[in-house]
Every structure is written in structure tokens, then in C-alpha cells.
Image (tube, coloured by chain):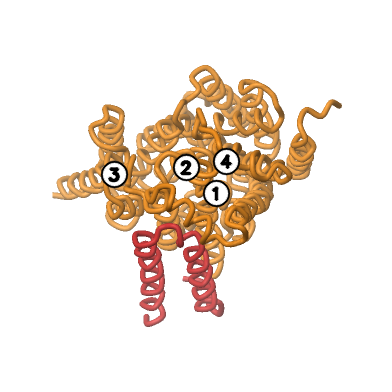
Amino acid sequence: MEVITPTAPALIIFIIAIIIMAIIYRKWAASIESYVVAKRAASPWLNGLALFSTYNSAWAVLGGPGVCYSYGIVEFATFIGWAIGVFIILWYYLPIIRDLGAKYGATGLASYMEAYYGKRYVGIIAGIIAWYATLFYLVGQIKGIGLVLSYGLGISYDTAALSGVIIALIYLTLSGLRAVLFVDALCTLIMMTFCFCSLYLLFALGGGNIFNTINTMYRFDPRTIYPTGEPYTTDPITLWVFSTIVYSMWQFTPYAWQNYLALRSSKKTDLSIFVTLATVSGAFITWVSILGPVGRVFLPYKLKDPDTVVLEVSKYFLPSLYPIFICGLFATVLATLDSALLAASTDLYHAIKGLIKPLETRIGGVNTLRIILIGTSFLVCYFAIVYMPVYMVYTMLIGMTGVSAALTGPLAVGLKWRKDPLAAITSLIISLIAAQLLVFYGITPWLTGCFVGLILSAIIYIIVTLARSH
Amino acid sequence: MEKRKLEHLLIFAINIAILINGIVIPWTTMFTAPIAWIILGTLLYYMYRHEGGE
């Protein structure tokens, strides 16, 4: 076989390991329960390690550093704020989600919401919204995987994007969540190696002292180290506080629900392992995002696409470790891509269950889900290739941060307070539309738009519930 | 009950400290935050290690 670039052997070994895992766990595709939530028996170590890389998307390793390239370490606020949210939200909500999910036999966000609120329409609407929002998010992931594979293998973006989707589909269709958990845990180990390499580079650039690197960046432009809040808000305090609040709700986004529902128990010992592993990933990713301003200060040339900064920095300064960077980036994006594809397909499957009943009786639930999975994958791949997003922020953050903010009423309030199906759907739809309109028409920066959506969702839920109870 | 209060206190105090650290000297959170979360997780684990869960 012709080796295209020095990175190719490393990537090929990684892909072979993934396929072997898929074959080993193929028997887990026997039923929907086992295929989608791995029999709800995943250990907190495995599941936490898997969530570590699942949570970190193409945004964390490509888009975020791209923003840091232009505006300084502004993304530290969103990553750290989000990780604070991981700890607090998961600690208080995961026991409810996991235990009620097991009681209801829920397989994802939509089926959980339907069972919790006791109305079919809640499942249909939540399923369609979850699928739609995840499509946006997936387009960004596929751009990420396309960029990484095209850099790593020297192939075109289109072929690279399609190859990434096909690799994910192999183990997704063959073994479902069980293989996803093992592949994602492996991805986490590779991702951590890549994060440590980023840290090494940061020390190396300052002659072994990180303070020298930071001082060089500070002297170049103080805003690289003390960002002003742009492009999200206009001052650093608002940036940190809003990021923490808005990103706390990120934990309700559809793509991590399989991990929550698959956890073996809600004991506090299991919870502390799972939550700590998932949270620490947020800080690890700041090691990568600081490569954004490093690229701006230390690279002798300017970048056309800021999203490629991590690739360019590693290629320029650490050519010998470049394969690790490529594999780390690929692993991080792949881990998010597979979970998001599985979640989107499961939610759509649940929403249109009535329509596809004849097909399901003919070929079985797992095979029907596989068809939806393949259809969703190629649909997203088509959009990512034909309409490649210039800035990932519009596809990833608006799609998912918007929907996670809109889920505040039905989940953050609804799970701890009173149940009301109509209030759940009203708050979800109105706040989602409001947040998207505010951001798309440029009325507010996206962080403020999502914050308004979040507050609106909680208020509408409370008002409708109180009005109906009278 | 006391343990429960301590749990809430630990979680909120440590996370708010990380947030303040981020506002004051953002770049240092890349080191302080993971250490703080690992300590927090370990403390919570040892607080509940003899219990079967709630």
C-alpha cells in the first residue's frame, strides 16, 4: 500500500483497532436496549473516559483555538465555565436521569421526555428538535474530521469527510453504544496524549519555562492573555459568568444522553468517578486552545482559515509529534461524531416510531435504527461537503447551545419541580425560536442570545405550569 | 444531613473559586481547574465510599 504521508501509518493502526472493537462487541446489537444504552451496565470509569472525549468536539480542538487565534484566550471562559456546569449539573441531575431512565426504559432524550411527561406529543416534538439540532452540530464535526484527515492523509476534504463518516458508521452499525464506549475511551487516551503534547509545546516555546511563553504573548498583545470578551460579549466578567450559566445547560444536549442512561448505577461513588472524569476534560482542552494565540504570536505567517491553527502550529513547531496531533484531533472529533450520530438517530427513531411500524415489524428495531443512522449520516455528510461551514460557531454552538438553553425549562426546572407536558413543549419551542432569531439576525451576540433563550425557557415553563394548575 | 451540607458547600465553593480564578488570571485555570476538580472528586468519593448510594 502506498503511504501518503508519515501520519498515515498511525491513523491506519488506530482505524484497525476501532474495527476490531466493533467486531468484538457485535453481539451487543441484539436488542434496542443493548444496542443504544449498552444494557445500562457501563462502569463509571469506562463511561467517564468515553464522555471525556465525547464532550470535546471539533469545536474544542479546532474551532475554539481558531477563535483564540483571533481574539486571545477568550474560549477559556466557555471551556472552564462549561466544565463547572458539567460538575454541578451532572452531580445533581444525573441520579434522576439515570434512575428514571432505567425505570422508563428510556433510550435517549426524546423517549425519556415522553415517559417523564407522559404524553406522546412531547416525545415526537423533542425527538424532531433533538435530531434537527444535532444535524447542525454534526455538520461542524464533519468539517472537523474532513480537515484533520485531509491534512493527515493528504487527501481532498470531500474524500476525507466521507471517510470519517464511513469509519464511524462501521462500528456504530455493527455494535452500537458498547463499541462507542470502548472506541471513545481509546479516543480519550489518544486525546490526552495530544493535550500533553500541546502543553509540552507551550513549555518548549519558552525555553522550558511557560512564563516566558506567556510573557512573549502578553508583550505581543495583552489581549491574547487577558481577552476583552470579544466576539461574544464586551467585557470579561460577563463573558465568564454568562459562559458558566449558558454552558451549564449544555449537559442536557441530546448527544450525551446515551452515556448518562448507560451508567450502571447512581451511587455517589460511581457518580464522583464519572463526573470528575467528564469535568477534567474541560480543563485539558484549554491546553489545546492556547495554541490559538501561540499560532498568532509565534507562526511567521498568517492563516487563511483560523480553524486550522492547531494543525499549522504542530506541523511547524513539532513535526516529529505531528502524527500524534493528527491522531488526537481525529480521535476527539470521531468520539463526538459517533455519539451525536447515535443520539440523533435514536431520537428520530423514537419520534417517527408510529410511521415506521410496518418496517420495524418486518426487519426489527435494531435494523430500522441502523437505516436511520445511515440515512442521517449521509444527509449530514452531504451538507458538510456541499455547504461547508466557514465558521464552525454557527453550526455547532448555535445548533447545540441554543437547544441546550431551550431545554432549561423542561429539564432543569421540570425535573426538580412540577411536571407539565404542555409547559415543557411551549417553553422548548418558544425559547429555541427566540434564541435562534436573536443570533441569526445579529440582534445580540450568540452568548447573550442563548442566555435570553435560557431565561425565557425557565420563565415560560414556570408561568404555563402555574397558569394551568389554577 | 451534615455530610449533605458539606457536599453542597464543597461543590459550590470549589467551582466558584475556579470561576473567580478565571476572571482574575484566565490562563492559570488551565492548571488550577483540573487539580481542583480531581481533589473535589476524590473528596466526594471518600465521603461516600462506605455507603450503598442514596
Q: Mark 1 points at which residue?
A: A288
Q: Is residue A440 visible?
A: yes
Secondary structure under the numbered disc 2 in the rendered image: helix
**Circle nearer the N terminus (2, 1):** 2
Q: Name the residue under label 4.
A: A310
Which residue is pictured at 56% across the width and 65% down the height? Answer: A273
Judging from the image, mark 1 belongs to the subunit labelled A
Colour of the chain lettered A: orange
Where residue A111 sits, quadrant-wise, is top left
Judging from the image, mark 4 belongs to the subunit labelled A
Label 1 and label 3: CA atoms lie apart by 23 Å
Secondary structure under the numbered disc 4 in the rendered image: helix
In the rendered image, the quadrant that contains the N terminus of chain A is top right
Colour of the chain lettered B: red
Q: Are marks 1 and 4 in contact (CB under 8 Å)?
A: yes
Q: Mark 3 points at which residue?
A: A233
Q: Are marks 2 and 1 in contact (CB under 8 Å)?
A: yes
Q: Do the residues labelled 4 and 2 touch (CB within 8 Å)?
A: no
Q: Nearer the viewer, residue B30 or A183?
A: B30
Q: Mark 2 points at which residue?
A: A64
Q: Are marks 4 and 3 in contact (CB under 8 Å)?
A: no
Judging from the image, mark 3 belongs to the subunit labelled A
Both marks 2 and 1 on one chain = yes
